[in-house]
Image (cartoon, rainbow, N blue to C red):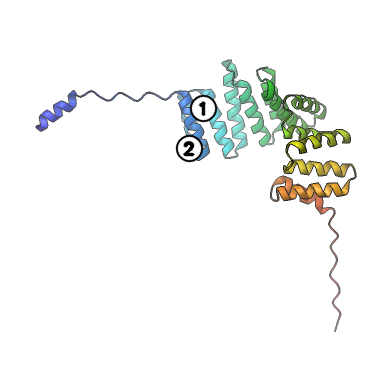
């Protein structure tokens, strides 16, 4: 075939069909994959996507990417904006997004905002069963952090009824009972936590705290040593080590060296 004929044939050939545009669901899946592999790339992708795509999903992925890099204040803002957009559009995802905003706020140590976000999630009334239980559990954490122990007790009791197999609910309930001076409730609830998570450092740490409150020094030491063994370099293990330090014998001054 001559060059002219080849050119004519090429021009006559049908052009390839353009690639179908990605749906928002496709973009969300791609963004989540980037969150696991390259959070900074996910942040860039979500930033571009929100200009021309779903503000709800783009902001949600942005929040998850910020969370993956532990930029909790930025994650909190992104989840809040996603939740606001979802609520404005009567999207059923709104409550779950408010919960994500609340957990980011707790991680950012902003308990007041966290409480407000959890309030927003629960007032919608769309969370049911275990989802509602976990949201009540999370709000209880925020309420404890803001010093509202009676309301935290109400939320934790509700959470225990909805997610009775969650050991965290029992640990937090036991810790709250200890803080409120209810030793009997604290002992009962930490025993329930231990049934569900016998090798959890947070359970062992709180068991030691409760035993110490009841004057059971040897039981407290045993529980704190278990927490230290289970998580030697984590926050629970380090807290147990500090608790055990109070029982360490005082350091003896060095003996005087005899003069020649």
**Residue 210: image tag:** none
In the displayed structure, 226 sits above or below 248; it is above
**Residue 58: image tag:** 1
Q: Residue furthest bottom?
A: 260
* Residue placed most toward the observer, 243 or 106: 243
**If the image is split into quadrants, where does the C terminus sit?**
bottom right
Percent across and percent down for residue 204 are 77, 43
**If the image is split into quadrants, where does the N terminus sit?**
top left
Is residue 156 visible to us here?
yes
Q: Residue furthest left?
A: 2
Determine whether, in the image, residue 201 is placed left or right of residue 257.
left
Percent across and percent down for residue 162 are 73, 24
Q: Which residue is mark 2?
A: 41
Q: Are marks 1 and 2 in contact (CB under 8 Å)?
A: no
- Helix, strand or loop for disc 1: helix
Give the quadrant of residue 171.
top right
* Residue placed most toward the observer, 249 or 70: 249
In the displayed structure, 127 sits above or below 48; it is above
Q: Label 1 to label 2, Cα distance in Å?
A: 13 Å
Give the quadrant of residue 6.
top left
| Mark 1 surroundings within 10 Å by alpha-carbon count, few (fewer than 14), some (14 through 19), many (20 or more) | many
Q: Residue furthest right?
A: 215
Q: Residue at x 72, y 42 (%)?
A: 200
Determine whether, in the image, residue 23 is placed left or right of residue 158.
left
In the displayed structure, 176 sits above or below 217; it is above
* Residue placed most toward the observer, 195 or 39: 195
Give the quadrant of residue 123.
top right
Q: Residue at x 64, y 25 (%)?
A: 98
Percent across and percent down for residue 164 are 74, 28
Is residue 38 visible to us here?
no
């Amino acid at each position: 075939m001559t060059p002219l004929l080849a050119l004519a044939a090429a021009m006559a050939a049908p052009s390839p069909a353009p690639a179908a545009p990605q749906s928002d669901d496709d973009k969300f899946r791609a963004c989540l994959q980037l969150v696991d592999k390259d959070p900074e790339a996910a942040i860039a992708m979500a930033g571009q996507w929100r200009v021309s795509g779903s503000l709800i999903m783009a902001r949600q992925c942005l929040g998850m990417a910020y969370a993956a890099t532990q930029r909790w204040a930025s994650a909190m803002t992104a989840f809040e904006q996603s939740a606001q957009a979802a609520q404005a559009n009567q999207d059923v995802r709104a409550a779950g997004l408010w919960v994500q905003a609340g957990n980011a706020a707790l991680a950012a140590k902003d308990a007041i905002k966290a409480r407000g976000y959890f309030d927003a999630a629960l007032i919608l009334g769309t969370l049911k069963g275990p989802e509602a239980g976990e949201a009540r559990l999370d709000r209880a954490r925020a309420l404890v952090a803001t010093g509202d122990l009676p309301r935290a007790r109400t939320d934790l009791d509700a959470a225990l009824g909805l997610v009775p197999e969650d050991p965290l609910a029992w640990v937090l309930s036991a810790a709250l009972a200890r803080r409120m001076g209810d030793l009997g409730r604290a002992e009962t609830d930490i025993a329930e936590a231990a049934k569900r998570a016998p090798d959890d450092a947070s359970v062992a740490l709180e068991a030691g705290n409760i035993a110490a409150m009841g004057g059971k020094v040897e039981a407290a030491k045993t529980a704190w040593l278990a927490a230290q063994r289970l998580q030697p370099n984590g926050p629970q293990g380090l807290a147990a080590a500090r608790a055990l330090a109070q029982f360490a014998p005082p350091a003896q001054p060095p003996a005087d060296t005899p003069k020649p």
